[in-house]
Image (tube, rainbow, N blue to C red):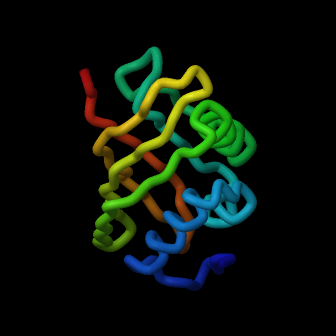
Amino acid sequence: MAMTHAQNVTVETLEALMKAFNAHDLDAIMEYFTDDCVFDASKGPDPWGARSTGKAAVRAALAARFEGVLDVQYDADRHWICGDLGVSEWLVHGTTTTGATVRARGCDHWEFRDGLIARKDSYWKIVG
């Protein structure tokens, strides 16, 4: 589903985005993002994780996630919208390329501009 700048962000928007993530459809996912978007991953060298800036860098970071956990899925999800901010809560699960099982509760904080994602800030519970 391609978004237009005039479109309001709704819970249904986040549900459709979740479907694109579960399909590993990078083209569909990136249609939701601004050209100057930012993705703060849950893991990385800084307090905010690993930061990717710009559509190409965000796409590459998401592609790496799909390549590292080939069967990654997000479910048990709930979503909230408040103005230009949103939250998606989910359970991520899959198997890494090394055979390790991934299963953790997490959430994304979304910041929208003109109906598109300007920032995705991702958090996962630490398991172990």
Q: Can you give x and y, in whole percent of width and height, for residue 108 in the image?
A: 38, 51
Q: Is residue 110 above or below residue 67?
A: below
Q: Can you give x and y, in whole percent of width and height, for residue 126 in the image?
A: 27, 27
The residue at the point 65 percent across, 49 percent down is: 36
Residue farthest to the top, as pictured:
45
The residue at the point 33 percent across, 37 percent down is: 124
Q: Is residue 91 left or right of residue 36?
A: left
Residue farthest to the front, as pictured:
99
Q: Nearer the viewer, residue 88 or 119?
A: 88
Q: Nearer the viewer, residue 68 or 85?
A: 68
Q: Can you give x and y, in whole percent of width and height, for residue 61 in the image?
A: 63, 36
Q: Residue 46 appears in which quarter of the rendering?
A: top left
Q: Nearer the viewer, residue 76 or 13?
A: 76
Whether residue 34 is visible to the viewer of this picture, yes or no, is: no
Q: Is residue 104 above or below residue 18?
A: above
Whether residue 45 is visible to the viewer of this picture, yes or no, is: yes
